Amino acid sequence: MRAVAFPEFGAAPVLTELPVPEPGPGEVLVEVRASSVNGFDLGVLGGYLKGVYEYEFPVVLGKDFAGVVAAVGDEVTTVGVGDRVFGVVMRPALGQGGFAEYVVVDSRYGLARMPAELDHARAGALGLAGTAALNAIDAVDPGAGELVLVSGATGGVGAYAIQLAAARGATVIATAEPGAQSAFVRALGATWVVDPAELVEQVGRIAPDGVQAALHLAGDGDTVAGLIAPGGRIASTLHFQPSGSDLETTAVMADPSAETLSQLATEVVEGRLRVPLAKAYALPDAPQGITDFVAGTVGKLAVTIP
């Protein structure tokens, strides 16, 4: 099978021929049709996760996947061959990934059925970022009319978080540069847009007493925390923990249970959540997608595998 992988630390990802993996007990072999680029891929590629995960070279990139079940191992009862599925690769070691024609995943976690109305490209860009966004919004639990600051609003997690917060009646303040980025976050439901370069001044004018909640997805954590009213809430995907404050703080690790994935898919199918696909790359061009992600992206970059 074809896969985009890197053979050792420090090496660039390249299109590689690898054997098709076989599912073990409780596992599912998925013929992958789509994936997407996430910040997690940069951590894997840069070797930053040494000590957290074992690297089984060659390491295939891609945390997301959407496709069709090609085979199942023993003890699998939730899906069968031919079922359309999507989710997040949640293997104990780094090796297999979604930037490949096939991937083996656990049938019990990180996997859900795709509704008939959901296409592979959108499903392949939904799992990790959508889960992180939903987990972060659940953590700060915004109420109707509350001000919620989303720092890092133009990325995949931020784009989903804006929509999820606005759907709960919150007033969203989103960080974005003037121009196309600002238009992007407004279209997703942000009421206010602030320039990250003038974050303190602009948020201070909108909310002089502070916002009730914030999502820290990018930027300086202390700066974001300083814009929250006393007793407010902050959720950080960057594991930021404010010191000496009375803020309710949650470090968010995406938890892609089947229930969460199914909830996200339903939101998309019923028109309440838009998958912000910015560009799609064929599998051989996935390394360029990673380069473009590093350079700065608005929304999600998909990888498609016909």
Image: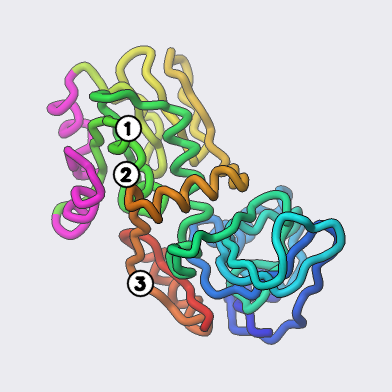
The residue singled out by tag 2 in the image is: 163
Q: Give percent across and percent down for residue 185.
A: 24, 50
Q: Earlier in the sequence, mark 3 or mark 2?
A: 2
Residue type, numbered disc 2 = Gln
> Could you tell me if residue 90 is visible in this image?
yes
Q: Are marks 3 and 1 in contact (CB under 8 Å)?
A: no
At label 1, which amino acid type do we have?
Arg
* Pointer 3 local density, CA inside 10 Å: few below 14, some 14–19, many at least 20: some
In percent of width and height, residue 188 lies at 25, 49
- 258 left or right of 26? left
- Quickly name the residue at label 3: 279
At horizontal 35% and vertical 50% (from top left) the residue drawn is 273
Which residues are the magenta region?
Answer: 179-208
Q: Is residue 149 left or right of residue 73?
A: left
Residue at point 61%, 47% (across, down): 258
User: Residue 168 bears which disc, if any?
Assistant: 1
Secondary structure of the residue carrying tag 1 is loop
Q: Position of residue 221 (x, y in %)?
A: 40, 33
Which amino acid lies under the numbered mark 3 shown in the image of this protein? Lys
